[in-house]
Amino acid sequence: MKVIARKDACAGHARCHAVAPEVFDLDDVGYISFYEKEVPAGLEAQARRGVRACPERILRIEGETLD
Amino acid sequence: MSETLERVPIKVRRHDSWPDIPAHVPMELVHELDYLDENSRTDPFSVTENIYNELPPVFFSPQFNPVLYKGVWVVTRYEDIREVYQNDALYSTEGAAGFQRLVGETFQMLPLAADPPDHGKYRLLLNPWFSPKAINVLEPQIKGVINELIDGFIDKGECDVAFDYGRIYPVKVFLNLMGFPFDKFEDFLEWEYAILHSRGDAKKMTWGTQGALTYLRSFIEEVRKSPNDKLGSAIVHGQIDGRPATEDEIIGTIFFLWVGGLDTVAATTSLMFRRLAQDPSLQQRLRENPELVPEAIEEFMRMQPLVNSSRKVKADHEIHGVKIKKGDHVMCYNTAGNFDPNEFENPREFRLDRQANRHFTLAGGPHRCLGSHLARRELRLALSEFLRRVPPFRVKEGADMRAYPGLIAAPRLPIVWTPA
Ligand code: HEM
């Protein structure tokens, strides 16, 4: 499973990190640090929660649509 | 507590005392909002509960801040609000929060009044001070401030949780973050209170604004001479895009931090405790499950959207078929949008199990509240430390329960408990 981030549109709410800190690494000033990332095994549910938490809707799981 | 029936936003007609309504605004889209009325409901924001049934998704409110804006278009739907926040190519913050103009000042409130890409240059200087990591470092100090306040009233069995707690701790935290001398504490409280709570008394507002600005300018001169490792000094000696910050940029940034960082947290705290004092089972649940506090803070914030952002339109366009013209203002009406049933199930219900709580109380897009992580941490600690130490509390008999669904919130809230 892969998370895709439209990094340039990140506004730094850090809600993804609040619900799934092991998936959503932030940079030093609190914005998402990657464009895409392989989700570590076992963290799939957390990753989905993190994607859903983004008020800007800039996150998605590869191959899945946002609800 | 009894629910009194309040008015919902009502339709109005052209009125002689209003500023001219622009010619392109169709009369059937002119509606006035009564949202600033104080009320005694358990949820003061529920005055907008019929807004989606009674009003079109975009309408023109002629009286909203007539001095600064001459009326605004109001968008009420969650998705439209998100679009306005995110689309900075179409919606500008030019002139935003410009009430310093009323006392003859010409500086801009920063970083708010700057649009991208300039806006990013100001955030670059400030973001490191407000990142989740930076706030982790502040946490012990915030905890200290909060516990010292609790020490002061815990044995008395009562306190005014709005006036003696919520109003105070954000100021103490802010003084420390900025590097303001501690003896300015009382002055800050008074100026701040005069600006926000003088209920339209222009003289008091002017006194508060000028008092704060005069002091802030002398502070700036002082740290210019002797820099330190606090945020105030970092702004005064800050580089914007490789050049030193100008006078206007420095005062605009420091003054806006002062305006944005104090009352917002105080007001949120007062409304949070107002709900808790009336809801023993919610209190109990959070006492038994302190790990739910962060989720609760999000839900308090969703249900208490204190700020509605305004934007200046950069080009003619349409929203829901309504012609919006360049130069018009559009307001993100979070007072409605945070309760949009298409985004939030049972929106008027306080719930701790929301799958996603993507409220816009702290705005969105590039101007996402700079202080959001600080505010969340302050609120979280103000709640969890209070619940940890103070026994179950309730509203003091005879207390005035009126509150505003906005920044004024509940300025006084006496509560009582039985000391352990
Ligand atoms: C619960 C408390 C708070 C609420 C509800 C709140 C709300 C908001 C909102 C809605 C905006 C966007 C304004 C707009 O779009 O026109 C904003 C921006 C801002 N807030 Fe907050 N705020 C809070 C706490 C704080 C704190 C503690 C600070 C700083 C110490 C702060 C500093 C700022 C700044 C500097 C901006 C401008 C950001 C920019 O334009 O890039 N706020 N806040």
Image (tube, rainbow, N blue to C red):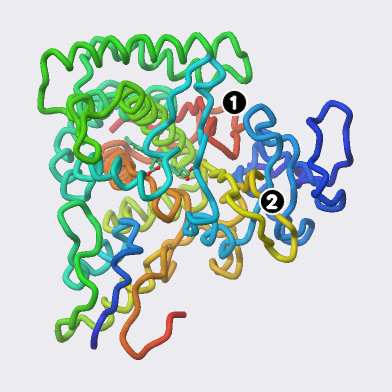
Q: Quadrant of the C terminus of chain B?
A: top left
Q: Residue furthest front?
A: B243
Q: Residue furthest bottom?
A: A63
| Residue B314 in the image, given as x and y percentages of width and height | 58, 50
Residue at point 56%, 43% (across, down): B310
Is residue B353 visible to the viewer in this orientation of the structure? no
| Residue A33 in the image, given as x and y percentages of width and height | 19, 65
Could you tell me which secondary element the residue under label 2 belongs to? Answer: loop
Residue at point 61%, 42% (across, down): B44
Q: Within 10 angstroms of label 1, few (less than 14), some, or many (20 or more) residues?
A: few
State left or right for residue B347 relative to residue A9.
Answer: right
Q: Amino acid at mark 2?
A: Lys
State left or right for residue B385 relative to residue B416.
Answer: left
Q: Amino acid at mark 1?
A: Gly
Q: Of the two numbered discs 2 and 1 on the same chain, state the one appearing first in sequence.
A: 2
Q: Quadrant of residue B408?
A: top right
Q: Is residue B46 above or below residue B78?
A: above
Residue at point 17%, 16% (across, down): B223
Q: Is residue B340 above or below residue B35?
A: below
Ligand 1's image quarter is top left
Question: Which chain does the residue under circle 2 lie in?
Answer: B
| Residue B213 in the image, given as x and y percentages of width and height | 39, 14
Please name the residue that numbered disc 1 is placed on: B398
Q: Quadrant of residue B67?
A: top right
The numbered mark at residue B325 is: 2
| Residue B52 in the image, given as x and y percentages of width and height | 72, 60
Q: Quadrant of the N terminus of chain B?
A: top right
Q: Is residue B239 above or below residue B361?
A: above
State left or right for residue B239 relative to residue B314.
Answer: left
Quick check: is the Cβ at mark 2 less than 8 Å away from ligand 1?
Answer: no
Q: Viewer-proximal residue, B145 or B224?
A: B224
Q: Are marks 2 and 1 on the same chain?
A: yes
